[in-house]
Image (cartoon, grey):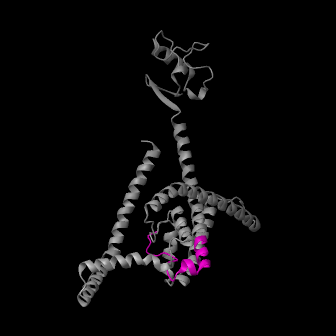
């Protein structure tokens, strides 16, 4: 089995093992809390139904009204500011789910917009990531020259460390800002920033959804959009380094496999002849049949005169064995 196939199979097995481990951990951490929350909510529901004598139909209607009214707490979602925020979320593939189109035309345009916008966004973020890596490499080289290090070149580890530090600074700073404006705890804000910049986008925490923020706080809206776009560009820089490293590993393994497969070992009468693999046209037969092709060389030998001597164990021995094999 080829090395690349082994690596792919290993990645599949490791990924599914990681999924199983994650499922077990989340089950242990969240299952009991979910059951307790459900019991509390059920008791509250039954108490409200008994206290106000609410029918099941009326209660279901109240649920719909509350759920549908939640996005409007931030103000109009489809005016220009809210629509621009939604378009940014679509292009960045975050998908909070805080607001969604309800008309047929809006849904159709959303699909068409995403088909063009998502590839465009990926290329843009990747290009910005490459420029950031280039800038980081220049800074690292100058810093090494200033510190008089033995090597002044920026290695992959240096770049990954730099982009990782920049990502950490962006997330921690953004967490502080959102904690102040949204009233979340710092840990919840940090969780929101991480979920946003990794494009997971659960939607349990969404900025700009309180106190008419989309219309009354334009500076905060601009800050949120800059955080998303610049943060995703920095994350793309880190991903760009990982992709380049993976492609380099693939290219190196492919060259090694080609090098290993460029020679064949032919046992004849207990002797081993190592030769290069050749096409049908490059082979010739000393007998009258066409088993090894019709092409001959001026010397009448099976191999061309330009074969290096290191590819044969012994030239005279090989000639003797070839003549015996062809009779």
Q: Pick out the residue farthest to the bottom.
A: 51
Which residue is drawn at the image coordinates 43% and 54% (left, top)? 11
Residue in the foreground of this view, choosing between 205 and 55: 55
Q: Horizontal and vertical percent for residue 284?
A: 53, 16
Residue 68 sits in quarter: bottom left
Residue in the foreground of this view, choosing between 219 and 27: 219
Res. 287 in view: yes
Residue in the foreground of this view, choosing between 28 and 94: 94
Residue 63 sits in quarter: bottom left
Residue in the foreground of this view, choosing between 22 and 6: 22
Queried whether the magenta region covers residue 14, the answer comes back as no
Res. 165 in view: no
Q: Horizontal and vertical percent for residue 97?
A: 44, 69
Q: Horizontal and vertical percent for residue 319?
A: 53, 17
| Horizontal arrangement in the rendering, residue 277 relative to residue 54 (left or right) | right
Q: Which residues are magenta?
A: 201-226
| Horizontal arrangement in the rendering, residue 17 relative to residue 87 (left or right) | left
Which residue is drawn at the image coordinates 62% and 59% (left, top)? 156
Q: Horizontal and vertical percent for residue 298?
A: 62, 12
- Above or below residue 183? Residue 17 is above
| Horizontal arrangement in the rendering, residue 67 relative to residue 58 (left or right) | right
Quadrant where the image shows the N terminus: top left
Queried whether the magenta region covers residue 210, the answer comes back as yes
Quadrant where the image shows the C terminus: top left
Report the number of numbered marks: 0
- Above or below residue 274? Residue 162 is below
- Above or below residue 289? Residue 202 is below
Which residue is drawn at the image coordinates 26% and 89% (left, top)? 52
């Amino acid at each position: 089995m080829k090395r690349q196939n082994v690596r792919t199979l290993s990645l599949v097995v490791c990924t599914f093992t990681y999924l199983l481990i994650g499922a077990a951990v989340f089950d242990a951490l969240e299952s009991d809390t979910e059951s307790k929350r459900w019991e509390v909510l059920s008791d509250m529901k039954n108490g409200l139904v008994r206290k106000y004598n609410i029918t099941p139909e009326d209660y279901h209607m109240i649920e719909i009204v509350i759920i549908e009214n939640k996005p409007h707490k931030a103000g109009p979602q489809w005016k220009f500011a809210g629509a621009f925020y939604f378009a940014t979320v679509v292009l960045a593939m975050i998908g909070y789910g805080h607001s969604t189109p309800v008309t047929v035309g809006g849904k159709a345009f959303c699909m068409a917009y995403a088909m063009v916008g998502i590839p465009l966004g990926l290329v843009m973020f990747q290009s910005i990531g490459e420029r950031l890596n280039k800038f980081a490499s220049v800074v690292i080289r100058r810093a090494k020259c200033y510190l008089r290090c033995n090597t002044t070149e920026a290695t992959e580890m240096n770049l990954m460390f730099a982009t990782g530090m920049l990502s950490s600074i962006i997330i921690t700073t953004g967490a502080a800002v959102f904690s102040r404006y949204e009233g979340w705890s710092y840990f919840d804000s940090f969780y929101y920033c991480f979920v946003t910049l990794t494009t997971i986008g659960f939607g349990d925490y969404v900025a700009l959804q309180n106190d008419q923020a989309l219309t009354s706080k334009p500076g905060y809206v601009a800050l949120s959009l800059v955080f998303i776009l610049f943060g995703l560009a920095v994350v793309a820089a880190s991903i760009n380094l990982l992709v380049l490293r993976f492609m380099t590993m693939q290219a190196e393994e492919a060259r090694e496999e080609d090098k290993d497969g460029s020679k064949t070992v032919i046992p004849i009468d207990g002797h081993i002849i190592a030769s290069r693999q050749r096409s049908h046209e490059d082979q010739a037969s000393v007998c009258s049949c066409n088993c090894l092709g019709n092409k001959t060389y001026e010397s009448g030998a099976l191999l061309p005169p330009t074969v290096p001597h290191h590819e044969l164990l012994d030239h005279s021995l090989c000639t003797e064995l070839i003549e015996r094999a062809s009779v």
